[in-house]
Amino acid sequence: MVNNETVLVLDFGGQYCQLIARRVRECSVYCEIKSYKTPIAELEKKHYKAIILTGGPNSVYDEKSPHYDKALFSLGVPILGICYGAQLMAYMLGGKVSSSEVREYGKTPFHVTDAKSLIFADVPESSVCWMSHTDYISAVPEGFQSAAVSDACPVAAMECQERKLYAVQFHPEVQHTEYGQQILKNFLFKVCGCKGDWVMSSFIEQTIAEIRQKVGNKKVLCGLSGGVDSSVAAVLMHKAIGKNLTCIFVDHGMLRKEEGDQVETVFRKQFDMNLIRVNAGEQFLQKLQGVTDPEQKRKIIGEGFIRTFEAESRKLGKVEFLCQGTIYPDVVESGTGNAAVIKSHHNVGGLPKDIGFEGIIEPLRDLFKDEVREVGTQLGIPEDLVWRQPFPGPGLGIRILGEVTAEKVAVLQEADAIFREEVANAGLRKKISQYFAVLTNMRSVGVMGDGRTYDYTVALRGVTTSDFMTADWARIPYDVLEKSSERIINEVHGVNRVVYDITSKPPATIEWE
């Protein structure tokens, strides 16, 4: 990306690495992420406006922990260290980092001690931040001073205004830090002097140009599911290369109710794309017979997608590239870099090594869901599609706990459609970030009419989130849940109990599998 005030997020293995980048972009400042393994010579050539050092799960005293060239702090570039990044700054510049007997984790009150600190401008003297650390800065380097404290942390923040070096022990990028975005804004605008003139249209223009440069006159296949991510990726590719793009829509038989027909209509009639629809439900269900492990289901479905693409591409002649709608939460949760693996995603973990294409293009790889929707809106995609509920690549296959069968798919399609309809009827469609039904593998006794039943339990799931990295369970009104439950039990054969999931992320993931 060509930009005259690019901020670098230097990743030391923090789970919130991309979230930091997202918060920076929310300030209309472009940023990019690079690994701590990037040579300092490469950083010097880029002339970054600022550098942010991320958190990480390690201790700075561990020889195996990620470190960096001390010359980083002599580049003359403003630097903000976060959590591990703060400790690394202190350690490398001669301060002291110690291990505490009291581990701070979660919402923590902290107090600003330097009223003249630029990064704490317009931040109250006392507020709440999000801590996640055992080690702490026990002595600041020469030329630094402590700017904030907490009950268990004598240096919740430190700074050297002369060198424009700042560090915070907490995580300003997460929503739980009350004034976290203000702190980042202060760093970007008051310390770094950023203009804040980057907009999403710049991303679109640059991405289209990069796609054209990479692809040239070669052919591209796009895995189109009809979900928000793959749809935006497909239209972005279509804007870049036109008829050199062929979209393969694999209907694996585990889509939401009537979704297959809707996808075909939108992309053939409205966008005039080269679209091949493959009805492969029976084949996928056969491969999933007897399979109950969620990771195995994801791998089977993911590889099935790719094999189907290969089969179709052979019919089309030579096709060099595969386009996917991967977004950054997929990458983070699949364990990119030093981040811990939570679960593999269809677009990431399911790719077989012998993919058979020259390369993979993931135009949305650096974006979060709300940013993807903004791109889709600017590209002219209909609102109904842009705001379609997030849907995993494996579809209902991972919303059916245990073995996937045609009967279970039919049950879940009906239950899910009812729940989504009632949420929409209540005017909550855009107020709940994601909502769907899960068919559990649990049967329970019930009474319907004068008879005893022994049928499935359906779980309803709703969350609110701005980034899908963390999420809170949605407080859906009782009358909406009641109406959904009544309709599901009365209208869907094989269900006699409905429950609502009130678990946030973490500790749970948004999907059940």
Image: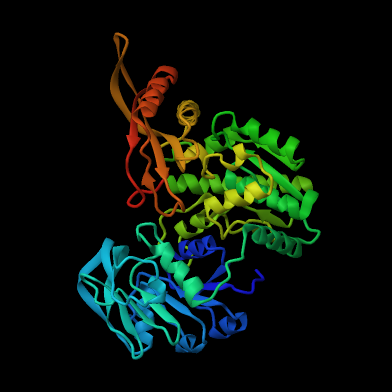
- The colour scheme used to paint the residues is rainbow
Estimate the x, y position of residue 398 in percent, counting from the top left. Answer: 46, 41
Estimate the x, y position of residue 298 in percent, counting from the top left. Answer: 49, 47
Name the image quarter holding residue 154.
bottom left
Which residue ends up furthest to the left in the rendered image?
101
Which residue ends up furthest to the top in the rendered image?
450
Name the image quarter holding residue 308.
top right
Name the image quarter holding residue 202.
bottom right
Does 398 sit above or below residue 170? above
Residue at point 32%, 17% (across, down) = 453
Image label count: 0
Does 73 sit above or below residue 374? below
Left or right position of 480 against 370: left
Q: Would residue 292 be visible to someone looking at this image?
A: yes
Estimate the x, y position of residue 134 in percent, counting from the top left. Answer: 26, 71
Q: Would residue 61 be visible to someone looking at this image?
A: no
Residue at point 36%, 47% (across, down) = 472
Which image quadrant: the C terminus? top left
**Nearer to me, 452 or 31:** 31
**Nearer to me, 281 or 188:** 188
Residue at point 54%, 83% (across, down) = 39
Which image quadrant: the N terminus? bottom right
Estimate the x, y position of residue 42 in percent, counting from the top left. Answer: 59, 82
